[in-house]
Image (cartoon, rainbow, N blue to C red):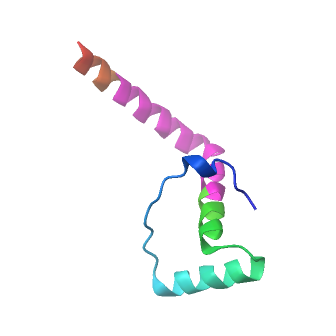
Amino acid sequence: MCYHNVLTRKATTVRLPEDLAETAEIVARARGVSVNQVILDAIQAEVDRVRQDEEFMGLLHTLVERDKEILDRLAE
């Protein structure tokens, strides 16, 4: 189980289709963890995956540079 950053967690609401929610509950019970942990693990896996995706990282870099340019213009 992963309990790092417990004090710095942000609450959010996730609306799942009923069948996915039921599946998440089954997975959680089988693993002996909470549904919250199943969701955290799934999000972390996706973040890890996109960090390895060169195309995604290129798009992200472009977005960050564009946002930086906009913020620089606003600061003038």
* Quadrant showing the C terminus: top left
Q: Is residue 51 left or right of residue 32?
A: left
> Seen in the image, is 32 located left or right of residue 34?
right
In the displayed structure, 56 sits above or below 62; it is below
Q: Position of residue 75 (x, y in %)?
A: 26, 16
Q: Is residue 63 above or below residue 46?
A: above
Residue 69 painted magenta: no
Q: Nearer the viewer, residue 12 or 71?
A: 12
Report the residue that reaches farthest toward the front. Answer: 7
* Horizontal side of residue 58 vs 35, given as left or right: left
Which portion, as a residue range, is magenta? Answer: 44-68
Q: Residue furthest top?
A: 76
Residue depicted at x 69% and y 80%: 27
**Residue 37: x %, y % from top left:** 65, 66
Q: Which residue is at 76% across, 76% downward?
A: 31
Return the residue nearer the eye: 16 or 54. 16
Quarter of the picture holding the N terminus: bottom right
Query: Image point 41% across, 35% down: which residue?
Result: 63
Q: Is residue 21 above or below residue 69?
A: below
Residue 53 versus residue 17: which sits nearer the camera?
17
| Most common SS among magenta residues | helix
